[in-house]
Amino acid sequence: MTEIIASCGCRQAGTILSATPRVRFRCHCTKCQAVYRAPYADALVLRRGQARPANQGMIKWVRTKRPSPLVRGLCSKCNEPVLAYLYGVLTIIPTRTVSGLKKPPIDCDIYYRTRASNLDDEIPKHDGMLSSHIALALPLTRVLAMPGRKVS
């Protein structure tokens, strides 16, 4: 089976993807802005088990907010995000770490109220927590109901 390897900037930590992601979104919350050191997090979503750490020993696990259903895995050397687990059933991978793979279109922008800059595109924008969670409900359900195809 072919696999895609995604890695952080220093290439010390990474993720092995065994399926193609079906969902992509951008998060503009202040936590993502701080962790990604960018105006937003551009993220791919897979089922847990379709992506795994390439080098578990190089990943430190953090929760940037308590309580939170999101556990983030950061490279212990460069502190860049490598992967995250949402509710223990979904894996989130930073889009910028993946190359050599056709990426799905962006489904939505969430927490847009706290954006660092405006985006002038046709992607649906959702401001607050409730609106953002509702906007992600269908795409995340799509991941659970119809997982991505095996990487070939």
Image (tube, rainbow, N blue to C red):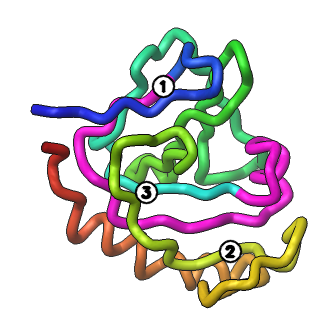
Asked which secondary structure carries label 1, the reply is strand
Q: Is residue 14 left or right of residue 5?
A: right
Q: Residue at x 24, y 39 (%)?
A: 18
* Residues at marks 3 and 1, CA–CA distance in whole angstroms: 15 Å
Q: Dot 3, how many residues are within 10 Å of its Cα: few (below 14), some (14-19), or many (20+)? A: many
The residue labelled by disc 1 is 14
From which residue to which does the magenta span run? 14-40
Determine whether 78 is above or below 141 in the image. above
Reading the image, the residue beneath label 2 is 110
Q: Nearer the viewer, residue 152 or 66?
A: 152
- How far apart marks 2 and 1 lie (CA) works out to 25 Å
Tell which of 40 and 146 is nearer to you: 40
Disc 3 to disc 1: CB gap under 8 Å? no
- The number of numbered discs placed on residues in the rendered structure image is 3
Give the quadrant of residue 147: bottom left
Q: Earlier in the sequence, mark 3 or mark 1?
A: 1
